[in-house]
């Protein structure tokens, strides 16, 4: 019983860290991260929802976010990630079987990947600051 306050304290500390990270990660958009995509055609913000895909082949690698996090490209498109922050990051594909090249962990420079000729959705993340589904992660959707 005497250990309970200590454990609670640690859990509270972790939660505070997570909250701080979430605030930093979402600070640029100014919108609530829990808002579902409204399906509207405006696409005014970067958004992480399913409707937030941006048609571009250039992705910025910032400190703790890929910008934009979701892009839409043609089959065979060459996508370039450009490091823009101060911290080291990497681009690591979730599905290694897709044959896409992951980057080294680096703090500057670029990484270029030629996407497959086939359509599909390819998720990636920074192994230092994210997981396949949270934190610093993104995706490339190849559409014909
Ligand atoms: Cu990172």
Image (cartoon, rainbow, N blue to C red):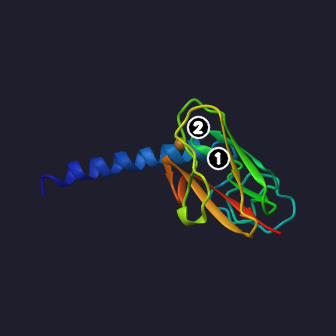
- In the image, is 55 to the left or to the right of 126? right
Q: Position of residue 5 (x, y in %)?
A: 21, 50
Q: Quadrant of residue 25?
A: top right
| Residue drawn where x is 54% and y is 60% of the image | 94
Q: State whether label 1 is within 8 Å of ligand 1.
A: no
**Does mark 2's beta carbon lie closer than 8 Å to ligand 1?**
yes
Q: Residues within 10 Å of mark 2 (few under 14, many from 20)?
A: some
Question: Which residue occupies the extreme right position in the image?
Answer: 41
Q: Which residue is mark 1?
A: 66
Residue 48 lies, in percent from the top left, at 67, 57
Location of residue 142 by image quarter: bottom right
Q: In percent of the image, x 67 and y 62: which residue is there?
A: 35
Q: Nearer the viewer, residue 86 or 40?
A: 86
Nearest the viewer among 7 and 77 is 77
SS type, badge 1: strand
Image quarter of the N terminus:
bottom left
Residue 14, numbered label: none
The image quarter containing residue 36 is bottom right
Against 47, is 20 above or below? above
Residue holding disc 2:
63
Q: As displayed, is residue 12 above or below residue 118?
A: above
Numbered-mark total: 2
Q: Residues within 10 Å of mark 1 (few under 14, many from 20)?
A: many
**Horizontal arrangement in the rendering, residue 2 relative to residue 86 (left or right):** left
Image quadrant holding the C terminus, namely bottom right
Please name the residue shown 53% across and 57% down the image.
134
Near-viewer residue (47 or 30): 47
* Residue 126, x across and y down, in percent: 53, 48
Q: Which residue is at the far left?
A: 2
Q: Are marks 1 and 2 in contact (CB under 8 Å)?
A: no
Q: Say what secondary structure mark 2 lies in.
A: loop
Residue 13 percent across, percent down from the top left: 35, 45
């Amino acid at each position: 019983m005497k250990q309970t306050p200590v454990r609670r304290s640690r859990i509270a500390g972790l939660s505070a860290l997570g909250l701080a990270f979430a605030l930093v990660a979402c600070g640029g958009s100014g919108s609530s991260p829990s808002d579902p995509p409204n399906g509207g055609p405006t696409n005014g913000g970067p958004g992480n929802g399913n409707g937030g895909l941006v048609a571009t082949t250039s992705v910025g690698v910032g400190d703790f976010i890929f910008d934009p996090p979701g892009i839409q490209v043609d089959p065979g498109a060459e996508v370039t990630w450009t490091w823009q922050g101060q911290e080291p990051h990497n681009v690591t594909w979730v599905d290694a079987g897709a044959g896409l090249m992951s980057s080294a962990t680096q703090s500057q420079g670029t990484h270029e990947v030629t996407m497959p000729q086939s359509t599909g959705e390819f998720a990636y993340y920074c192994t230092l600051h994210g997981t396949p589904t949270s934190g610093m992660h993104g995706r490339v959707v190849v559409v014909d």
